[in-house]
Image (cartoon, rainbow, N blue to C red):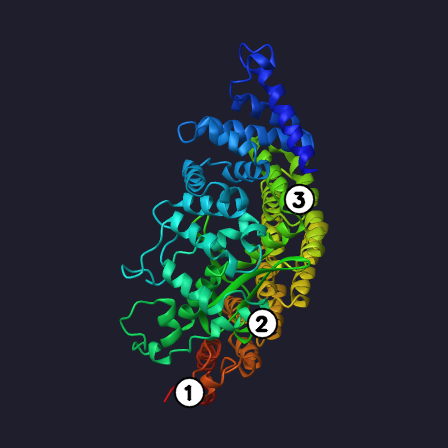
Amino acid sequence: MWRRMMTAAAVFAGAMLLWLPGGHAADEAADQPLDPDAAKARVVELATDGQLTDELVAAFTAYAEARARKELDAVVSQDFWTWLDANPEMKFNLLIGLHPQYNPSVVKCLVQLREKFGKQVDTHTNLALAFAFVHGASPDRVREPLMGYLVKERPEPTMLESFEYYLRGERYMAKDVLVSTPWRLLVLVADNEIPISEREWALKEFGPRKPAMIGAIYDLPRYDYDQLRGEPRIGDLPHTLANIRKYGGICGDRAYFASRVLKSCGVPAMWDAGEGKRGGHAWVAWLFADRRGWKMTDCGRFRYDKYYTGQVHDPLTRSRMLDRDVELMAAAISKSEKSYEEALIGCHVYELFEEDARSAAMNVLKSSINRNTLCAPTWRLLADACAKGILPLEDGKKMYNFMLKEFKDYPDLTHEVLGYILKAKLESSEEANKREIASNLKLLDATCQIYDKLGRPDLAVKMRLLHGGYMEQLGLTKEALLLYMRESQTHVRRHFGFVELFDCAIAIFNDLNAPVDKVRYISQIAPKVPQWVDSQLDRKNNILSPDFLYVVGVYVDALREVGEDREAEKWEKKIVRE
């Protein structure tokens, strides 16, 4: 299949030379570069009311090369392209990765790596691409320092020094990890910013470990409770890996330690952080391969605090992204790295069309799903098309129903996509008929139940909020109130986000001027709110949960509003700290 695709690209590129001004035969124009405008015209022609075929994939690859050759002409020589021609897989991944910015810094980095390491780049193409894209995204430094860890005593190595470290240390890492890992996952290794000496320390101390043993690295630095009081045991010493291991730290330090140790051992790892019952927290997440493909796992993500999602650093965009998006991308690449890139091509082709003409390329976008079902950008573009009216809402609903089955292990994307689809459906509620309204309400209710069954009450709560908001928008205020009351009681012990449902119910009671009914409702909720987050430390020190403090505070005010001062004093004592 790979050879067929590259052969088709070569045949198409040769045919395109005949389109050049003054070119009447391929041999007369053999030395002339392919014209990007002509190449784009061919892509648009194939894409209009067409499918994502191998011919279209080859045409877009030829267009991407024409763009790259023209825009990067001052950066690289013909020798570079000759070298790439001899490395078709690397060339394909580079061209698709460059689109649409065609950042010259990425190619400059790849040229530097080739000049310095020669044949080793040919044998480590994925690692070289990862380094080129990561360092090309910000030539001055790999990434912004986290929490001030990088200081003058801990200089960040250059790209060449870092690449050389991995080549030199490869023998002590998991077998072939730097060769076989796809480049889009290896960026989570290439973004390692710590000094070489610390990497060597980490590799010597930990070396290759089985996935079951990796998680223990997070717990090695003991938790520094003194640091919470502003007196860290590490003092003014630099936060080297060895110092963190010796003196310990809080969750952010432990996540930093574990993620940098793993990166130094060739494991794609992330400093992960999110909000849970106790507030903000940081842990380590990493990718590993088993017989079924690439998976994401983590350590320090305390389940009782309900950190359902976290934010990680995206080395390519220098921004934060959802860790679940990394997990989904790894799953998509596990299906087939090549099919994932081809699905991205379908997205790129669709975006070549002006927005008011994108309906002509809708079949290309839809057929991209057939290349790789788990490619998230495809679904996001389809959802966006629904929201903008390019794709009929009924098609969007069918698409979502399909996703609920296919993405049962990745509900965050289905939630995001449904938000796009429902945004258009719910905003058009004034024109909606009774049948359509009933259909929308049924879809919302069914989706909430699905998220509950999947063990993601955080998403169920968000969907119930959308559900109730839709009811209020339709004027179904009392129905919305009943929903908020029911769901807040359902989720009071399951998810910290239940307070948002609680607030919606309180707001309606206030609008209805129904203080007695409000007190009756809160009297059913308040006793169920957990006083402490599930922690012996919190119980010992009587650190009450934020939810308990908030709900009881509202209850006290509501009781006083109806003249039940004695009951108010009784509940107020529960939240007054000695």
Sequence-first disc among 2 and 1: 2
Instruction: Return the x and y of residue 433 as percentages of the image width and height.
Output: 69, 48
Instruction: Return the x and y of residue 552 as percentages of the image width and height.
Output: 47, 80
Q: Is residue 103 above or below residue 415?
A: above
Q: What residue type is labelled 1?
A: Asn
Q: In this view, does 212 lie above or below 326?
A: below
Instruction: Return the x and y of residue 187 as percentages of the image width and height.
Output: 49, 51
Q: What residue type is labelled 3?
A: Leu
Eye-nearest disc, 1 or 3:
1
For the C terminus, the quadrant is: bottom left
Check disc 2: other Cα within 10 Å, few if <14, some if 14-19, many if 20+. many
Q: Please give the residue where the numbered disc 3 appears in the rendered image.
A: 393
Q: What element carries label 2?
A: helix
In front here: 405 or 467? 405
Q: What residue type is labelled 2?
A: Ser
Q: What element carries label 3?
A: helix
Distance Cα–Cα, label 1 vs label 3:
53 Å
Sequence-first disc among 1 and 3: 3
Asked whether residue 47 appears in the rendered view, the answer is no
Tag of residue 90: none
Distance Cα–Cα, label 3 vs label 2:
31 Å
Q: Please give the residue where the numbered disc 1 appears in the rendered image.
A: 541
Tag of residue 488: 2
